[in-house]
Every structure is written in structure tokens, then in C-alpha cells.
Image: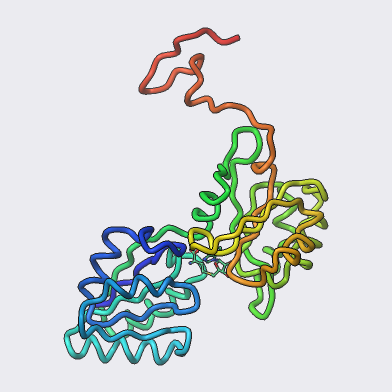
Amino acid sequence: MVHFVGAGPGAPDLITQRGAALLQGADCIIYAGSLVNPALLGLAKPGCAIYNSAEMTLEQVLDTMRRMEAAGKTTVRLHTGDPCLYGAIREQMDALDTDGIPYDDTPGVSSFCGAAAALCAEYTLPTVSQTVIITRMEGRTPVPEKEKLQSLAAHGATMVIFLSIGLVAKVQEALLAGGAYTADTPAAVVYKATWPEEKVVRCTVGSLAESTKAAGITKTALIVVGDFLGTRYERSKLYDPAFATEYRPATESKQ
Ligand code: SAH
């Protein structure tokens, strides 16, 4: 059996209890060494075979899983954050299906949640934005034509941009070209959210590239953009005394 597990954004105590138990029981751990905190490998039992997938191809990862399965062993495939975002899990799962190897998937705290926590921010502020766009800038990896950053930026919604800090000047250009954000729209860069070396840089869309450079951030960072980082919003209806819900009657009349 293969268990895909989300390692969380960095801090080792942000893995789920289920994920930690699976790591403790594993005969083999294949971890995404570029981003997973190696401290998590301390949960492995003695004799557990440990592989760093950053140095492996998909074929080598699959061969390792097949070898373990043939020996009746359990493998944990440890991905950073939650495996469902930029985790390249589908191609592994499809190959396991072909081979008839059973697997399951344990979620993790994605770095976009870790970044919100570092900022003490709410992405979905009433009247500001009720939508979070998770995307990336095209680089060596293309993105579909209809998902170009500039066109997604036309919504003015909250955006969380993965895998793009090395292209931050182009990100800034595309965000402004979208037409909904201005140079003054708040933005932030969060480097290694939840790690001891976490850095938070608050800036604006117009100063995004310059601020990132000044902070010396070149990798392992998220760019977040939108007026959720500003000061204006309306209070929630859910907790408004004049608003009845299934669990609570209205206790004040509407103004
Ligand atoms: N599945 C992961 C994302 C993997 S893609 C998740 O759910 O978070 C790798 C990219 O995620 C990095 O280039 C960076 O943009 C972002 N990332 C991962 N961990 C991060 C962290 N702790 N802080 C900031 N960004 C992070």
C-alpha cells in the first residue's frame, strides 16, 4: 500500500495526526526533499528506507513503490503542503492504478494557509473578495492560455501565486496589466511560511519586485495580492445581531 501524505508547510507539528501515524508505521518514505522539513523524517521507525524524490525521476519513484509493494511493505509518499496543489500526484496514482497497487491520500496544511497565518490575514473578507485564485506564472512550465496571470488578475480577487518568486518582475507586470489592481493595491511575499526562518514582506503591487529583491528572497515563497490586505471591509453577516441564522435568532432590528 502507498500512502500519499501532505507534510504541511514546514513546521513539523503542522502535519496531521493521521499523517504522523502513517510516517511512524512506514517501511519506506519517499519525501519531496526540496521543500519537506527533514525533521519529519525523525518520525520514521528504525530501518525505514528513506528516499529524497528531489533527486529521482517519476520512473525511479514508481520503481521504488513497486519494489516495496512486492515485498509487502508500506510506502509513504510525503509531499509538501497538501499533495493536491502542484504535487504531481496524479501521474503517480494513475501508474499505481495500472499496476493494481492500492493507495490513499491524507491531506496537509497547504502553504497558502501557512502564508495567511503568517500574515494573520483572512483571504475572504466580506465586500472585498469572496474568491481566492491559486495560480502560478508560466515559466519553464507552461500554463493554459486561458489562465494567463494577466487575465486572472482582471478579477481583482484575492490571488495566491505559487512557484513564481523567481519571476516576480513579470508577475508585477502581469498583475498591473490585468486592470483591476493598481500600483497601490496591497501585496505581500511570504518566504518559508511556518519555518523558523519565515519572512513576511508587506508591500504593494507597484513595489512587489523591488521589495522582494530588497529582502533577498529568491525561492520558497508565495506572492499574495489583494485588498484583503488593506484596512476596509464590512463585518460578517453571520455574527451580526440583526441577522438571524439557523442557530441564532436576530436580537436587534436592522438599522
Ligand atoms: N503542495 C504544496 C505546493 C508545492 S509547489 C502546498 O500545498 O503548499 C512549491 C511552491 O509552494 C513553492 O515554490 C512556493 O511557492 C510554495 N511553498 C511551499 N512551501 C512554502 C512555504 N512554507 N512558504 C511559502 N511558500 C511555500
Residue 134 is situated, as x and y percent measured from the top left of the image, at 59, 58
Residue 151 is situated, as x and y percent measured from the top left of the image, at 74, 58
In the foreground, 67 or 31 = 31
Color scheme of the displayed model: rainbow
Residue at 32 percent of width and 84 percent of height: 50
In the image: residue 101, left or right of residue 244: left
Quarter placement of the N terminus? bottom left
Residue 34 is situated, as x and y percent measured from the top left of the image, at 50, 78
Q: Residue furthest left?
A: 72
Q: Quadrant of residue 209?
A: bottom right
Residue 33 is situated, as x and y percent measured from the top left of the image, at 45, 79
Q: Quadrant of residue 37?
A: bottom left
In the image: residue 200, left or right of residue 68: right
Quarter placement of the C terminus? top right
Residue at 48 percent of width and 15 percent of height: 241
Residue at 69 percent of width and 42 percent of height: 227
Q: Quadrant of residue 115?
A: bottom right
In the image: residue 246, left or right of residue 192: left
